[in-house]
Image (cartoon, rainbow, N blue to C red):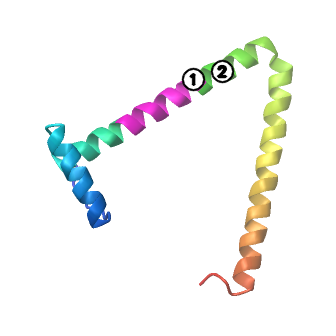
């Protein structure tokens, strides 16, 4: 199955993409599909490498890894709370509609 959707890009960008697609022997749709696949593959590789590194760290120092993970979770919670407070402050000031 192939999903269809539309995107909006500036006219000059479209012309550049169209030219590249033609040079590469594909369509604009095919060009974007190839680009999306490259990005997805890169993301999967990055996540796999990160998971491998985490497992290596965990194997070397299980206690240290657990402590580091707890500290990271705490920092993330603090950052999320700060972001919520800032967003509330901005809304209260009427800056965001």
- Across the whole image, how many numbered discs are drawn on residues? 2
For the residue carrying disc 2, how many other residues have a C-alpha within 10 Å: few (<14), some (14-19), or many (20+)?
A: few
Residues at circles 2 and 1 in contact by the CB criterion of under 8 Å: yes
Apparent side of residue 33 relative to residue 73 in the rendered image (left or right):
left
- Work out which quarter of the rendered image holds the C terminus and state it: bottom right
Q: CA distance from mark 2 to mark 1?
A: 6 Å
Q: Is residue 3 magenta?
A: no
What residue is shown at x 82% (from left), y 31% (from top)? 68
What residue is shown at x 76% (from left), y 48% (from top)? 76
- Residue matched to label 1: 49
Residue 28 marker: none
Vertical arrangement, residue 10 with respect to residue 1, above or below? below
Q: Which residues are magenta?
A: 38-49
- Name the one closer to the observer, 42 or 78: 42
Q: Secondary structure at mark 2?
A: helix
Q: Residue furthest top?
A: 60
- Residue matched to label 2: 53
For the residue carrying disc 1, how many other residues have a C-alpha within 10 Å: few (<14), some (14-19), or many (20+)?
A: few
Q: Secondary structure at mark 1?
A: helix
Q: Residue furthest bottom?
A: 94
Q: Position of residue 86 (x, y in %)?
A: 76, 70
* Quadrant in the picture for residue 72: top right
* Quadrant in the picture for residue 25: top left
What residue is shown at x 78% (from left), y 55% (from top)? 79
- Work out which quarter of the rendered image holds the N terminus and state it: top left
Q: Is residue 39 magenta?
A: yes
- Name the one closer to the observer, 33 or 76: 33
| Residue 1 seen from this side | no
């Amino acid at each position: 199955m192939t999903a269809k959707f539309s995107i909006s890009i500036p006219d000059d960008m479209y012309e550049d993409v169209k030219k590249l697609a033609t040079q590469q022997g594909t369509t604009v749709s095919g060009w974007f599909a190839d680009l999306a696949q490259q990005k997805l593959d890169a993301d999967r590789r990055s996540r796999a490498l990160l998971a491998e590194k985490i497992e290596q760290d965990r194997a070397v120092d299980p206690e240290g890894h657990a402590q580091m993970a707890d500290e990271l979770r705490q920092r993330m919670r603090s950052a999320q709370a700060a972001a919520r407070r800032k967003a509330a402050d901005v809304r209260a000031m009427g800056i965001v509609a």
